[in-house]
């Protein structure tokens, strides 16, 4: 088979969907030398990282002899997705095109598989497409918003098969896009091998990542501020990432035990997890949710949302809370921080739960989907 993949996200910051693509493709190429793969990129593009940042990522993939990387230039993403990519796919005589990140062309000259990670853009439509002001800004958001709605409700149903990263997302895809369960395969993601116990001392702080609205980090700050001051002093909250609005909220709350620190790429995320006494992940919605899995793989106890796919990922190995209840989050924090036996139990359970997910398994399940779509068994 000759298989093409949308590789645009590998030219941007490696998180979420880009982590999924890099690890899935790397493990596919490790095991499959019989099929030919073509990775399509888009450069230049305003949201790409500098070449010195993404070149090592592409170089890591270039070592595989059955992979070619083809750059397609286009003035914007719409032209790239709907015109340039299908033309290149025909030129390359693809058997199958795998669109890896919630986007796809309407017409392709081969079988089409789409990974739909989540339905966040539809479920939180106003948060994504109702933020700009002025006539030009509102028109831009209207145009992009209509394209997104068309993508989810008209293009996705035309795919030969859909890959979902969780059962929860698959249910949302069926409910919102009208795609039957029989045309969706759930393949769980995993976390990288670097996330493991490192044997370094715990430093007592609670860790939280992310600052986007649906990540619900503001509720974490408010919950921490409700803890007794001696507990806050002993267990400060560290927000990993440069989010000015969270720094402003901490000041507004008068909580001097919150640190909002820019991402420091000289310090590995694995070491942060290992140093933290606990990790708080109370997102309002996630298609999968790799961070709690990373934390558990490092032996760090987790407080997790009971919404979206998160319960599916953490199982019984986390303290689950209603993410919309600041009081409930605060109570879980206090319980975790004052009960060493509970932390030990969550640590052991988390390590066991994380071991159930692997990129090797994820890759083999992708290969099976490709083959079954080509053989018309899906």
Image (spheres, grey):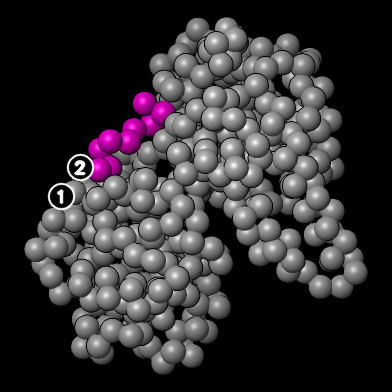
Residue 130 in which image quadrant? bottom right
Mark 1 secondary-structure assignment: helix
What's the mark number on residue 202?
Answer: none
Residue tagged 1: 348
**Outermost residue to the right:** 135
Residue 153 in view of the camera: yes
Residue plotted at (36% across, 88% down): 256
Using a 10 Å C-alpha cutoff, classify the residue at mark 1 as few (fewer than 14 neighbours), some (14 to 19) or many (20 or more).
some
Furthest residue toward left:
341
Residue at 25 percent of width and 43 percent of height: 353
Please tell me whether residue 21 is drawn above or below residue 334 in the rendered image. above
Residue at 72 percent across and 27 percent down: it is: 158
Work out which quarter of the rendered image holds the C terminus and state it.
top right
| Front in this rendered view, residue 93 or 180 | 180
Label 2: few (<14), some (14–19) or many (≥20) C-alpha neighbours in 10 Å: some
Q: Position of residue 143 (x, y in %)?
A: 84, 53
Q: Is residue 355 magenta?
A: yes
Instruction: Evaluate if marks 2 and 1 touch, with contact meaning CB atoms under 8 Å apart.
Output: yes
At 27% across and 71% down in the image, what residue appears? Answer: 332
The part of the image, by quadrant, that contains residue 280 is bottom left
The quadrant of the rendering that contains the N terminus is top right
Judged left or right of residue 155, residue 345 is left
Is residue 286 within the magenta segment? no
Find disc 2 in the rendering and name its residue. 352
Q: Which residues are magenta?
A: 353-362
- Residue 272 visible in this rendered orientation of the protein: no
Q: Position of residue 312 (x, y in %)?
A: 37, 45
Q: Position of residue 116 (x, y in %)?
A: 58, 38
Marks 2/1: CA distance?
A: 6 Å
Numbered-mark total: 2
Please determine whether, in this image, residue 28 is positioned above or below residue 203.
above
């Amino acid at each position: 088979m000759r298989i093409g993949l949308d590789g645009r996200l590998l030219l941007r910051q490696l998180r979420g969907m880009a982590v999924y693509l890099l690890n899935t493709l790397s493990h596919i190429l490790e095991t499959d030398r019989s099929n030919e793969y073509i990775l399509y990129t888009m450069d230049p593009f305003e949201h790409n990282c500098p070449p010195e940042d993404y070149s090592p990522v592409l170089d890591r993939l270039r070592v595989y002899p059955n992979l070619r990387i083809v750059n397609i230039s286009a003035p914007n993403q719409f032209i790239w997705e709907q015109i340039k990519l299908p033309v290149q796919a025909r030129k390359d005589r693809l058997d199958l095109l795998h669109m890896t990140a919630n986007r796809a062309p309407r017409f392709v000259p081969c079988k089409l598989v789409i990974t739909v990670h989540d339905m966040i853009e539809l479920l939180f439509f106003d948060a994504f497409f109702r933020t700009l002001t002025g006539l030009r800004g509102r028109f831009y958001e209207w145009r992009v918003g209509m394209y997104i709605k068309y993508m989810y409700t008209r293009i996705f149903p035309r795919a030969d098969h859909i890959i979902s990263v969780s059962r929860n997302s698959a249910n949302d895809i069926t409910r919102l896009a009208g795609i039957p369960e029989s045309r969706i395969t759930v393949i769980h993601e995993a976390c990288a091998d670097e996330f493991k116990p490192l044997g370094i001392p715990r430093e007592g702080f609670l860790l939280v990542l992310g600052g986007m609205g649906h990540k619900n980090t503001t509720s974490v700050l408010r919950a921490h501020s409700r803890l007794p001051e001696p507990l806050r002093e002993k267990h400060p909250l560290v927000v990993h990432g440069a989010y000015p609005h969270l720094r402003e909220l901490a000041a507004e709350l008068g909580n001097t035990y919150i640190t909002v620190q820019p991402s420091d790429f000289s310090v590995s995320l694995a070491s942060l997890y290992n140093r933290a006494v606990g990790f708080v992940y109370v997102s309002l919605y996630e298609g999968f949710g790799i961070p709690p899995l990373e934390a558990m793989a490092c032996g760090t106890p987790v407080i997790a949302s009971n919404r979206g796919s998160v319960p599916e990922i953490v199982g019984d190995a986390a303290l689950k809370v209603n993410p919309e209840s600041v009081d409930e989050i605060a109570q879980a924090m206090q319980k975790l921080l004052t009960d060493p036996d509970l932390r030990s139990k969550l640590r052991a359970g988390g390590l066991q739960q994380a071991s159930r997910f692997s990129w090797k398994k994820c890759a083999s399940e992708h290969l099976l989907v490709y083959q079954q779509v080509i053989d018309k068994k899906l």
